[in-house]
Image: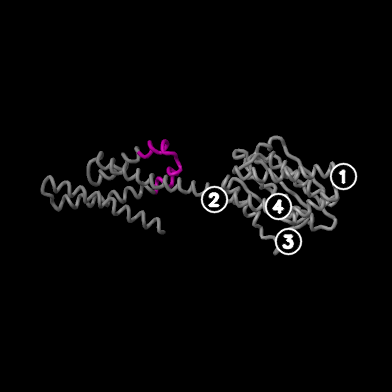
Amino acid sequence: MKRLRVYLVCQALGWYAHAAANIIFTAVEEPITWKQIAIYCWGALAGILTTHGLRAYIRRHGWLRLSPLRALPRVAAASLVSGGAITALVSLVFIWSITVFLWEVIYFGVHYFERLQRSEIEKLRLEVAAKDAELRVLLSQVNPHFIFNCLNSLRALITEDPARAQGMVTELSNILRYTLQSGRTDTVPLASELEAVSAYLKLEGIRLEERLQVSLEADPQTLETRIPPMLLQTLVENGIKHGVARLPRGGEIQVAARVESEAVKIRVRNSGQLVEGGNSTHVGLNNARERLRLLYGNAASLVLRNAGSDAVVAEISIPLGHA
């Protein structure tokens, strides 16, 4: 409503300022009559009505989404047509066409500027969301509880299985390195994310032992798909924390990536069930959805649902044209 009010005020002020300027210039050169003043004022009203109709036409046909190069021929043609319409009511074609052209330049200029601002804001929001996710995951991975579990497992393995203990240190190092490096970019290839997820699951496998079963499958066509860093890691971590780790018998984590129906589908399936009103705040999931939206708009999605009575599925969908 505020934007419409500003637009209407600018319309009235702009066109009647144009009429006032014409009246002043005419009065400087020769005595002006009331008839001439009335014609200029009527011309301003005709300009308001004509350009208001032109505005509706522009918005209906999506001209504001065009690049300046594609919009310019349409703007020029619309200026001639609109100028002719005003001329039919008032004066000369050329003069009014130029006036309408200037009106269009101002109108398009305002909208291009707003679109540029929105684009910059979305870019900044994406950067903030990415940094927030990086910090959240980093803190969750290096918090004392996580380190305590790793050190306990290492202590046991050093004497029982030194080679496996060495491998555990390597996997932990890989996770921390990836977490730090991923903060430098908005997206990473799915292949890189899968490597980090694999390292994480190996560490959890040492802690949970036979209680954790793992399955990782990825269609080669999906490996170069760009996704927000730590996105898949967040879903797998949630599956362990809120699903498998809470079950006395343990469970399974399945990660699969395939091309289906012109989209890349990435699914994380874990044993367990979604519980209404549980302890989870869903901060990680909300953050993941927001990062997908900022990158791909409504073309991508993240859905979390129960699958039967003993499993939960999180599914990311990214159309091939955006992947």
Mark 3 or mark 1: which is in front?
1
Task: Label 4: state its secondary structure.
Answer: helix
User: What residue is shown at x 18% (from left), y 49% (from top)?
Assistant: 23
Reading the image, the residue beneath label 3 is 275
Q: x%, y% of residue 128? A: 56, 51
Looking at the image, which residue sits at the far left?
Answer: 31
Which label's residue is closer to the chain start, 4 or 1? 4
Q: x%, y% of residue 86? A: 27, 45
Q: CA distance from mark 4 to mark 1?
A: 24 Å
Mark 4: few/some/many CA within 10 Å (<14, 14-19, 20+): few
Q: x%, y% of residue 55? A: 38, 48
Reading the image, the residue beneath label 1 is 161
Task: Label 2: state its secondary structure.
Answer: helix
Q: CA distance from mark 2 to mark 4?
A: 26 Å
Mark 4 or mark 3: which is in front?
4
Q: Is residue 317 magenta?
A: no
Which label's residue is closer to the chain start, 2 or 4? 2
Q: In the image, is residue 174 above or below residue 132?
A: above
Disc number for residue 142: 4
Q: Nearer the viewer, residue 31 or 34?
A: 31
Q: Nearer the viewer, residue 142 or 69?
A: 142
Q: Which residues are magenta?
A: 56-75
- Secondary structure predominantly adopted by residues drawn in magenta: helix
